[in-house]
Image: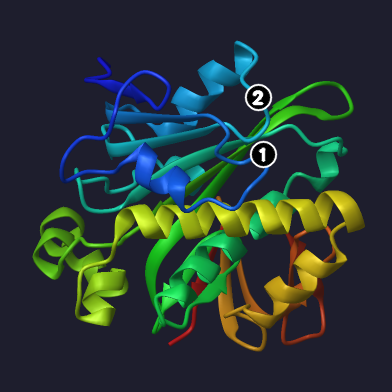
Amino acid sequence: MREAWELDVTEIGPIAGGLSVEQIRRRLMTDRVGGHIVLFGEVGSTNDALRRRAEQGAADGTVVLAESQATGRGRRGKPWFSPAGLNLYASVLCRPSIPLSAVPVYTFITSLAMTDAIGAERIPAAIKWPNDVLIDGRKAAAALVTCARTRAAPAYVILGAGVNLNVDRAWLETALGPAAAGATSLSEVAGRPIDRNGFAATFLNSLERWDDEYRAKGPAGVLAEWRARDALTGRAVEIRDGERSYCGTVRGVTDHGRLIVEEADGTHHEVSTGEVVVAR
């Protein structure tokens, strides 16, 4: 995949009509996140582009943004619809000192930051475990968190975020077909265009705030706020994991980020993988 163009804030100014590193950094209130920002016109995926930089020693808080992704993906390798010039496709590098078992909390951190930024647009949003953000029950954003593993701890964690900002209903229907009924964008809900640079800065500011909370105080505050925005607790769901499936009621999440599902006979499951289908 050829990366069509790359903009580094230290080398070149903003492109008219598109994302602007200068405008984003002007609104940042961070110490680490966004200290170095790389902007692509087109990239395979922002997570992959940032992973290459992480392997080369990129600093904690490095950000990769893109106007479009050719091979954007979500959880379980599903493709992520990434039209040019409309949405937010972002990845942030973190180098925390945590055990591997704690990495899932970064999915919660990313989801909280996305809902904070959406809320700043006066749009209420909720989080569907483990990584989807919903507006009026329809998917508007998702997180994809990956890490490079050592024996006992991650060498680094990459926090990926995709948010439907200004994509319209026609785009969604063309790209997603019948599945478009379950998707939306902020502009569709708000009835107005969303400032992508302002949204990106708000997201990055919130991301650092939640990451700082986690690094300083542990996961309790992050988990408490995530639970307050949880869309699934109390809902009837079907869990599909390969050839195995079962139904039950969601009873919350564990402190390690697993979904707690109770079957009708009282059997409890702690779910870490699989697809969650909400009963209608």
Give the x, y percent position of residue 161: 47, 49
| Nearest the eye: 170 or 29 | 29
Residue at horizontal 76 percent and vertical 65 percent from the top: 222
Give the x, y percent position of residue 200: 42, 53
| Nearest the eye: 123 or 269 | 123
Give the x, y percent position of residue 224: 79, 75
Give the x, y percent position of residue 147: 67, 32
Q: Which residue is mark 2?
A: 59
At mark 1, the secondary structure is: loop
Residue at horizontal 55 percent and vertical 39 percent from the top: 34
**Labels 1 & 2 near each other (Cβ < 8 A):** yes
Q: Quadrant of residue 250?
A: bottom right
Image position of 252 (left or right of 145):
right
Query: Is residue 1 something one can see in this rendering?
Result: yes
Q: Quadrant of residue 272?
A: bottom right
Q: Mark 1 is on which residue type?
A: Arg
Q: Is residue 46 above or below residue 244?
A: above
Residue at horizontal 26 percent and vertical 35 percent from the top: 14
Name the image colouring: rainbow
| Nearest the eye: 212 or 179 | 212
Q: Which residue is mark 1?
A: 32
Image position of 116 (left or right of 141):
right
Residue at horizontal 47 percent and vertical 53 percent from the top: 27
Tell me the quarter of the image containing the N terminus: top left
Image position of 137 (left or right of 81):
right
